[in-house]
Amino acid sequence: MSKKDFYEILGVNRDASDDEIKKAYRKLAMKYHPDRNPDNPATEERFKEAKEAYEILSDTQKRAAYDQYGHAGVDPQAGFGGGGGAGFSNFSDAFGGIFDEIFGGRSGSGGGSRSNIYRGADLRYNLEISLEQAAHGTETKIRIPTMEVCEPCHGSGAKPGTQPTTCPTCGGSGQVRMQQGFFSIQQTCPKCHGSGRFIAEPCSACHGAGRVKQHKTLVVKIPAGVDEGDRIRLAGEGEHGVNGGPPGDLYVQIHLKPHPVFTRDHNDLHCEMPISFTTAALGGEIEIPTLDGAASIRIPGETQSGRVFRLRGKGIKGVRSHTQGDLLCHVVVETPVNLTERQKELLRELEESSRNNDGKHNPRAQSWMDKVRDFFAS
């Protein structure tokens, strides 16, 4: 027995709590453990001292005897009744709680078994809908693959007429403890794979799994205003749980089909609106489509390509929005094609008359040419 002061060895005060003593010992044990300091007798001796000090101070009766009589109070040869420690008997006991937390076991010397009841897996279904369905809402049916309880064995995994037995390797706990030197690690039982049960004669339908792959049809209600990437949760429609566990959920992922006219930007809609050269120059009224029917737009004279006209409230009202989006129409002036000789002649006359007015009829072109001349002149 070391003659050094046990409190001094652990680096704690004499009124230290049990938790403080335990933390101090764990810190020293990790620092001076022989596996971490091979071929170093000095650290091995420090480890033994810390272990001995903890075995005394972690026991209420031994600590009281040590506080009153010093080393003589806990020395078996001194006749005070000291002896084998009631504290941690080895390094793995001291760190058992830590390893249990890391590897998923339970603390305590009893080792206890973990629950073998597991929640079913969540599922995802990709659903493609049109822009109109997303805007107004719809109801549709989907058919999904799922793992259902095997009917012949009623989910037990055992051949009908037989029953699973307790796993002989882990005793039904689903866990086995592996000893590696000072370390004791809890692992999943390799025989039953954590279920705690052993099936001698597996069911021929599910091969012992207790579940089989099937398909089921569900009705999905799509709320008005859903957008690309939105998810709809169907509680309890995922895979069935294991050993009576609750089922998972089904998440329906929304994807929008490309639309021939509109593109969506959150709650707003965009569309390109081709207009003739004449309409752009002289103005006029054109009809455009919306999700709720046709609408008219008045095009003012001298409208340039790229101008945007906004129709308030002709977009989409999102699921979480309180207002309706807008429809933005982007004007594209279309250049005439397949012209007759007479039409070409008229356009040449128009071009000639425009040149004789010092760019009055083409201010943007004239401004650009002025900038080009200034650039080359500088």
Image: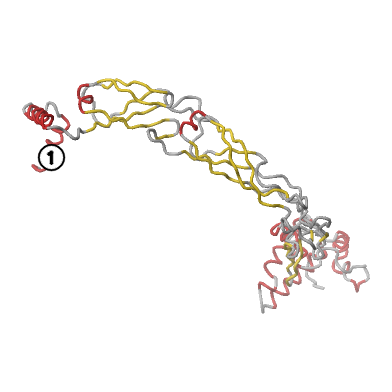
Q: Quadrant of residue 307?
A: top left
Badge 1 element: helix
Image quarter in which the N terminus is found = bottom right
Q: Which residue is mark 1?
A: 372
Left or right? Give the position of 259 relative to 127: left
- Residue at (62, 40) in percent of width and height: 217
Image quarter in which the C terminus is found = top left
Between 197 and 215, the one nearer to me in the picture: 215
Query: Residue 149, percent across and down?
Result: 72, 49
Between 196 and 6, the one nearer to me in the picture: 196
Q: How many marks?
A: 1
- Residue at (67, 67) in percent of width and height: 31
Between 171 and 51, the one nearer to me in the picture: 171
Query: Residue 191, percent across and down?
Result: 75, 65
The answer to whether one can see residue 25 in this image is: no
Query: Residue 239, percent across and down?
Result: 67, 47
